[in-house]
Image: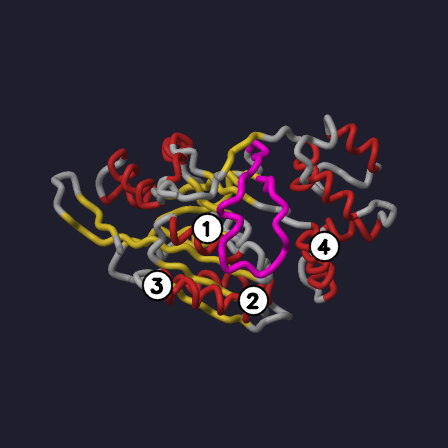
Amino acid sequence: MAARIFNMTGNSTMNIEFTAITMVRGEEDVVFASFLHHLRLGFDRLIVLSHIEHDFLRECVAELRDSYPEKEIAFVEIEDEQGFSRRKADYINGALDIYLKKDCYNVVYGFDADEFLTFKKGLTVKDFYASFAQRFPGEENMKRFYFRLPWINVICKERIAYQQDLEGKLLEAEYWSLGEQASDTKALFVHRQSHRLHMGYHWLMAKQDGTVLEPEAEIMNFAREWEACIYHLPLRSVEQFFARMGNYVSSAAKQEKHNRLSQFFIDNPHINRQHFFEMCIAPTPSYPSYEALKADMGPAIEEMVLMAFTKLMVKPRIDIGKALSPATS
């Protein structure tokens, strides 16, 4: 159900709707959990763009439509292998143009299947917006509703098999957090026709000249008060890790973006991928520092090349428990 904006006198003005949009390829172990999490988080509309592999996503969408008949769940199948990287931004922004209503304000959040937007105490995106509107009243402040939220790597304590999941098992699991911001780039914003969502959901850009738009400091401080962040599950199982590397190699073969992780293992066949994975998800850090890691694995494993994974090897774990469970669970 859409919310309504209230002006300073308490009179109702324009409706506001909340839309989450994602583009998915594979990730069958986590995608249903991610969809379910964001619907529980209060989004009125979920837009799913499926790239190439559609069958399981159709099942996910059908299941969620049955469970949430009050929500709008849009599903778009994309058959595009050759020019996908160049057109990804067009698919995303085109879908927003099609599905967002023109007679209301639209709060939009873009996410990948292994990312989970969260707020303190399990509160919802509508709670977050309502608090923002109370702190910054008036429709003029709607233009300021733009956040680039921290992206925090988390490790699942449990060994959950890599398989199609229509139960959302990862939502009930317990986690360790790496306890630091991997980036402040994931966008949560009020959609405006003059802006365009970057293809990687990393920021907003002005349509006219491509200028990257920066969120305001006091707005970002508000988000920090709410502990607004995105928990990122980069590694869930060794099968998923191997599949990811296979996708990287496949993408490179199709002249798309080449990922340096796959190249690292191609260039260093002496490094056991299974052992590499186990060191990433160990209950305690596998190395005391980056220097110790490089000394053991060689100079090819540079910090900036494998940042997401080397962080998992060297950073202390913070127990965050069932961080993805809703407040009512």
Q: Nearer the viewer, residue 22 or 29?
A: 29
In the image, residue 318 above or below residue 171: above
Residue occupying the point 39% across, 43% down: 329
Look at the image and give the residue range highlighted in magenta: 154-180
Which kind of residue does numbered mark 2 sit on?
His
Give me the C-alpha separation between circle 2 and circle 1: 24 Å
Residue occupying the point 54% across, 58% down: 165
**Which residue in the protein does label 2 denote?**
51
Which kind of residue does numbered mark 1 sit on?
Met
Q: Nearer the viewer, residue 1 or 328?
A: 328
Which kind of residue does numbered mark 4 sit on?
Phe
* Closer mark to the observer between disc 2 and disc 1: 2
* Closer mark to the observer between disc 1 and disc 4: 4
**Which residue in the protein does label 4 denote?**
242
Which kind of residue does numbered mark 3 sit on?
Glu
Residue occupying the point 70% across, 50% down: 238
Disc ID at residue 205:
1
Disc ID at residue 288:
none
Is 168 on the left-hand or right-hand side of 52? left
Disc ID at residue 72:
3
Q: Earlier in the sequence, mark 1 or mark 4?
A: 1
Q: Nearer the viewer, residue 320 or 140?
A: 320
Give me the C-alpha separation between circle 2 and circle 3: 20 Å
Badge 1: few (under 14), some or many (20 or more) residues near its Cα, within 10 Å? some
Helix, strand or loop at mark 3: strand
Identify the image quadrant of residue 122: top left
